[in-house]
Image (cartoon, rainbow, N blue to C red):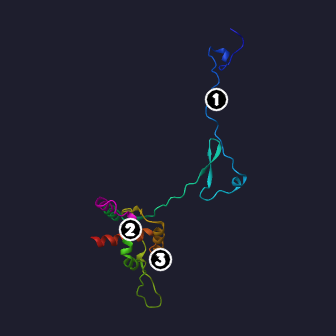
């Protein structure tokens, strides 16, 4: 034995032969087009704007995705959500092409009962001595008690952004308090008329 210690990766310490260098690639290196200095210094447009991301220690640029339209939602009583679901399923079974979405059914329910909804949410003055005009606060949304069933959230899919904005404008205009109260009362009136 020799007095000199050899490391684990010392090639002369093992009977393994060293592999030759790999051959050069057959394909030429990827060519990067020359970008004029004017174009390189120009700020990216809003459509092609990119954001830096961290990947394996270096920053790369990824294009931003356009924001998708997010459909509005509303919380309604479970029995109304069930009736809405059943109506949509029945329409799809009858004719899948002309079937209405949940959002379309809600918008049509609001259109058909617009006058009734305005009257329902309008503040009602109470009889007083005539000095002050008090309003009835019974229109405000009732609190849900522990024993009551929780509302079900429905997505108003199938409506345009402009219709969603108009729906929120009606909430303010008619003083319903929130979108859920308007949608719930519109569906209640709509299904009462159908029954």
Which label lies toward us, 2 or 3?
2
* Mark 3 surroundings within 10 Å by alpha-carbon count, few (fewer than 14), some (14 through 19), many (20 or more): few
Tags 3 and 1 touching, CB below 8 Å: no
In the displayed structure, 65 sits above or below 194; it is: above
The stretch of residues the image draws in magenta is: 88-104
The reply to whether residue 108 is in sight is yes
Badge 2 or badge 1: first in the primary sequence: 1
Foreground pick, 84 / 120: 84
Badge 3 or badge 1: first in the primary sequence: 1
Q: Position of residue 67 (x, y in %)?
A: 53, 58
Q: Position of residue 80 (x, y in %)?
A: 34, 65
Q: Which residue is mark 2?
A: 106
Foreground pick, 183 / 51: 51
- For image coordinates 39% across by 76% down, the residue present is 114
Foreground pick, 34 / 44: 34
Q: Which residue is mark 1?
A: 24
- For image coordinates 61% across by 31% down, the residue present is 26
* Mark 1 surroundings within 10 Å by alpha-carbon count, few (fewer than 14), some (14 through 19), many (20 or more): few
Q: Position of residue 83 (x, y in %)?
A: 32, 64
Which label lies toward us, 3 or 1?
1
Q: Which residue is mark 3?
A: 173
């Amino acid at each position: 034995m020799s007095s000199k210690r050899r490391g684990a990766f010392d090639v002369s310490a093992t009977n393994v032969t060293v592999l030759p260098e790999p051959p050069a690639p057959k394909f030429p290196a990827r060519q990067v087009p020359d970008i004029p200095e004017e174009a390189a210094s120009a700020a990216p447009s809003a459509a092609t704007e990119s954001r830096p991301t961290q990947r394996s220690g270096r920053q790369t640029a990824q294009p931003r995705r356009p924001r998708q339209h997010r459909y509005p939602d509303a919380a309604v009583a479970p029995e109304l959500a069930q009736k809405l679901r059943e109506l949509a399923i029945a329409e799809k079974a009858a004719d899948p092409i002309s079937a209405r979405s949940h959002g379309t059914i809600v918008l049509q329910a609001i259109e058909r009962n617009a006058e009734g909804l305005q009257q329902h949410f309008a503040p009602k003055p109470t009889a007083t001595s005539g000095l002050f005009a008090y309003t009835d606060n019974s229109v405000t949304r009732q609190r849900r008690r522990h024993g009551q069933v929780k509302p079900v959230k429905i997505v108003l899919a199938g409506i345009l952004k402009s219709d969603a904005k108009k729906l929120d404008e009606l909430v303010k205009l008619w003083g319903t308090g929130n979108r859920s109260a308007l949608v719930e009362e519109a569906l209640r009136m709509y299904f009462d008329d159908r029954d």
